[in-house]
Amino acid sequence: MSMSAADDIQHGIRANLAQFLHQLFQVLLVGMTIGMTRTVVPALAESEFGVPRGSFAMLVAFVVGFGFVKGTLNFVAGRLAESWGRRRVLLLGWITAFPIPLLIYFAPSWDWIVVATLLLGVNQGFTWSMTQTSKLDLTRPDQRGLTIGFNEFAGYIGVAAAGVITGYLATALGARTGLLIFGLSVIGIATLFTALFVKDTLPWARKEKPMAAASGGVLHPRYPAGVSATPSTGEIFSLVSWRDRRFFALCQAGMVEKFVDALIWVFYPVYLYSKGVSLPGIGWIVGVYGFTWGGAQLLTGRLSDHWGRQRLNVGGMWLCGSGVALMLLGEGTAWWSFSAAVSGLGMAMLYPNLSAAIADISAPHWRASAIGTYRFWRDLGYGIGALGLGWAAASTQSIEGAFWFVAIAMGLSGLGLQILGEETHPRLNPASNEKVGAGETALNTH
């Protein structure tokens, strides 16, 4: 970008509406890419891909691999985005996705599904990270909750819609053919649109200005003290992972909430299929979770810009875990759909606002790396959670044991966030004068 173009950079959704909408379309397709594996693959693991009945460890293996790969690639994507730019990382993520539907189509065994899901982890680590980071670059600090709400709304509407669509396609065309057609179509469109329409938003991040208060003053975020002007990878990773208790509280909550998503990915379809629900029926019940999560984020993300992040995050952890427990306490499509909606609403309260809280207290010149570190721990929760699910199910010799494991973990994690976390919104909890001076010195040095 030329100097004159850089001088014309403005922040805000309205000022960057066309590019903001392109990024929303991208994350919709990102959600569809992971969503195509949510209904058909777990439900037909035994009949289509040869997973023995009751082999919980083998069943969760693909989500374990996905979690560890995606978590690692989230961190890598954050660091690459500081030097390569956001657009190149996004494009690389889409290129890696092309073999996924082919591997599923030709899979002679479950091992191929695991490999396909490892590539899915690479794709999701690069693409979802960049769509979120890019939108945060474009918008103002006081729009972060709304921005991430829009981002996750589009992504999880895509997840839910793909689960429903692939359920019908699998019934009409067969599991493999339906997933092949859907997957190649989504990935091809996404790659083409990235190449033609997506701009790199790194210049917007470099031109970010402090957040202005309604009174005309400047609001100062509570950035951590003692961070160098050009922090290393190790410095950012340790800061976000454990050295700052607020970051630690947010990271552990992000990791544990992924236990819910792992449960819904692996065991909801198996549980509902065992109860006699059809593939389209499973798609709709699981879709209620995704549609509620996605749709409600348009409200909860915006609410956090006014009410703050902490109360929504803690309450969301507890409500989401309650929905998981409710799934086991009744029978029938209406009850299961209601339980899924409760979990979806809780997830909508916490999901965009954990990320918004991370962004609140991350300085612009290392924000992508901080978000990448948080997303490393958050999506590692897929792997750790799936291991926990497999252990709980094997220990109790029932799928229900996995549900109770997740419900209890969510309750305890929410308590940890309540004790160790704090409000991060700079209008509701601004930095002290001493911390403002230290933070501005580091930013100005950069």
Image (tube, rainbow, N blue to C red):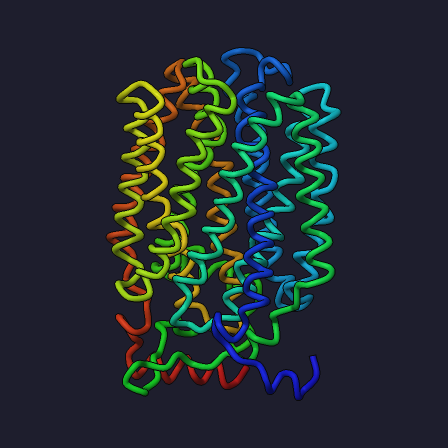
Residue at 34% over, 60% down: 246
Corner quadrant of residue 76: bottom right
Q: Residue at x 66, y 43 (%)?
A: 186
Up the image or down, 278 lies above or below 385; here it is above
Q: Horizontal and vertical percent for residue 337? A: 35, 29
Q: Would residue 263 be seen by someone viewing this image from the given angle?
A: no
Determine the image quadrant of residue 286: top left
Residue 243 locus on image (x, y percent): 40, 60
User: Which residue is more in the foreground, 25 or 404?
Assistant: 25
The vertical placement of 40 against 373, above or below, is above
Numbered disc total = 0
Q: Residue at x 71, y 52 (%)?
A: 191
Quarter in which the C terminus is drawn: bottom right
174 and 312: which one is in front?
174
User: Nearest the camera: 233 or 43?
Assistant: 43
Give the image location of residue 356, x and y in percent: 40, 61
- Residue at the (45%, 30%) spot, across then down: 284
Using residue 320 as the reference point, say whether residue 366 is left or right of it.
Answer: right
- In the depicted structure, whether residue 403 falls above or below residue 394: below
Position of residue 26 in the picture relative to residue 323 (left or right):
right
Residue found farthest to the top: 53
Residue 397 visible to an observer of this rendering: yes
Residue 96: x percent and y percent?
72, 46
Q: Could you tell me which quadrant the N terminus lies in?
A: bottom right
